[in-house]
Structure formats: structure tokens, C-alpha cells
């Protein structure tokens, strides 16, 4: 597929996201079309590769499939939505809404229409690495909105969740824990671990399948 020539040409721009984006897209290649990719948090500027430009990548991918596949992207910021709409094709439906509300409604429609959704890409609510809790809680809410819809093969990816260490109290004093998924995905990771979901990758982005719920 010609998409891969395009992706190879821009992959260096993705930096530490390059490997995990490639894994996501190879995962999508396993599904016969048409498919729907669902993204929370849309691209906000031209070639702002530091944000990942996921909407653009997904647009290029479904356009190259040429089988009726599409992207649903949601963002609460109308300005971001307007910018994104100007940068992508009609294969991408960009909606202005709270992502949790959107996802809850989307899964009802997806069930009714029997849509194939092999990828949920969760990247809304900008992260403050010092005060990570609001973003992490929001992403857990996003997962709660879709978890009953997920199939074993559905890949759920969260951006901005680089592994980090913590200090914990012990009888010997403070100890440093082994690195764990942090940032936006910290609470999603704890839930995933509780239900024995399969961790597919964990770098700057983390992805899981088989939530088993």
C-alpha cells in the first residue's frame, strides 16, 4: 500500500512515537475494511509533529485503504476542530464535544451499525506532568465509556504515558519503585492490569488489547 512509503518519509518527525505508531498501523492492516478509527484530541496545527499529528496519519491511512474506512476525531476546542477540518480530507469526521460524552454516544451508534473499530486512540485533555491527575482521570473516564464495546482484538492506545518511577515508604526508608506507566495512562494502566488486559507496547505511548470485560 502506498501509505507505507508516505509513512516512512515522515516517521523520523514522530521521534519517540514512531515505533508505536507503526505498531498501531500494522495492527490495522490485519482488518478487512471498512474500519473506523476513533481518536480523542485532534491535531491543532500544521506539521506540529511534537503533538504527533495523529489525525493526519490516520487520514492518510484510511485514504490509502480506499475501502470506505474513516476516522472519527473529537475535541472540546472549537478552534482546534476548525483547524483540523482544514487539514484533513472528508474521510475524517471532526466533532466538537467533550470526549467522554462523544464516546458514550458513539458506542451506542457503533453497536447499532455493527461498525468495525479496531483502534481507539485516546489523546485528549493536555497533560501536566507535575499535576497529572486530572488528565489521567479523564482518560480513565474515556475508557469507561467504551470498555463494554471493546472486542478482544481492539487496540486501545493512550498518548503521553512515558514510564516513570515513584518513591515509596518502607521499613528501610524511601525506595524507588520499578518504572510504571505514568502520565495520561496511569489510571488506565492500573485498570488494565486489574482485568488482565494484554499490554501490547509501552513506550511514550501505551497500548492494550483484550480488556476481558
Image (cartoon, helix red, strand yellow):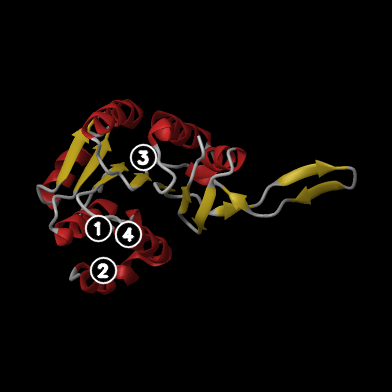
User: N-terminal of the two: label 4 or label 1?
Assistant: 4
| Residue at (29% x, 53% y) in the render | 54
C-beta proximity under 8 Å, tags 1 and 2: yes
* Residue 11 coordinates in the image, percent (x, y): 31, 69
Q: Nearer the viewer, mark 4 or mark 3?
A: 4
Q: Nearer the viewer, mark 3 or mark 2?
A: 2
Give the CA distance from mark 3 to mark 2.
23 Å
Under circle 3, the secondary element is loop
Give the CA distance from mark 4 to mark 1.
17 Å
| Residue at (50% x, 41% y) in the render | 211
User: N-terminal of the two: label 3 or label 2?
Assistant: 2
Query: Residue tagged by mark 4?
Result: 30
Under circle 4, the secondary element is loop
Give the CA distance from mark 1 to mark 2.
8 Å
Q: Nearer the viewer, residue 55 or 117?
A: 117
Query: Residue tagged by mark 1?
Result: 57
C-beta proximity under 8 Å, tags 3 and 2: no
Q: Nearer the viewer, mark 1 or mark 3?
A: 1
Label drawn at residue 3 = none
Determine whether 65 is above or below 161 in the image.
below
* Residue 108 coordinates in the image, percent (x, y): 29, 26
Judge left or right: residue 152 versus residue 169.
left
Residue 129 appears in the figure: no
Query: Residue tagged by mark 2?
Result: 7
Query: Residue tagged by mark 3?
Result: 124
Give the CA distance from mark 4 to mark 3.
26 Å
Amino acid at each position: 500500500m502506498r501509505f507505507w512509503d508516505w509513512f516512512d518519509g515522515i516517521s523520523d518527525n514522530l521521534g519517540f512515537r514512531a515505533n508505536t505508531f507503526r505498531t498501531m498501523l500494522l495492527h490495522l492492516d490485519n482488518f478487512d475494511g471498512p474500519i473506523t478509527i476513533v481518536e480523542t484530541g485532534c491535531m491543532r496545527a500544521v506539521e506540529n509533529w511534537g503533538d504527533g499529528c495523529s489525525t493526519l496519519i490516520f487520514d492518510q491511512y484510511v485514504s490509502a485503504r480506499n475501502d470506505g474506512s474513516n476516522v472519527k476525531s473529537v475535541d472540546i476546542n472549537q478552534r482546534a476542530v476548525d483547524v483540523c477540518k482544514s487539514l484533513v480530507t472528508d474521510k475524517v469526521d471532526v466533532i466538537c464535544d467533550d470526549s467522554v460524552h462523544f464516546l458514550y454516544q458513539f458506542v451506542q451508534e457503533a453497536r447499532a451499525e455493527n461498525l468495525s473499530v479496531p483502534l481507539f486512540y485516546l489523546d485528549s485533555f493536555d497533560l501536566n506532568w507535575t499535576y497529572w491527575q486530572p488528565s489521567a482521570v479523564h482518560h480513565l473516564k474515556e475508557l469507561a465509556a467504551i470498555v463494554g464495546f471493546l472486542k478482544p482484538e481492539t487496540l486501545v492506545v493512550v498518548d503521553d504515558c512515558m514510564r516513570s518511577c515513584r518513591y515509596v515508604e518502607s521499613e528501610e526508608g524511601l525506595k524507588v519503585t520499578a518504572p510504571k506507566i505514568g502520565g495520561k495512562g496511569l489510571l488506565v494502566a492500573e485498570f488494565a492490569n486489574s482485568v488482565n488486559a494484554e499490554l501490547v507496547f509501552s513506550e511514550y505511548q501505551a497500548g492494550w488489547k483484550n480488556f476481558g470485560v
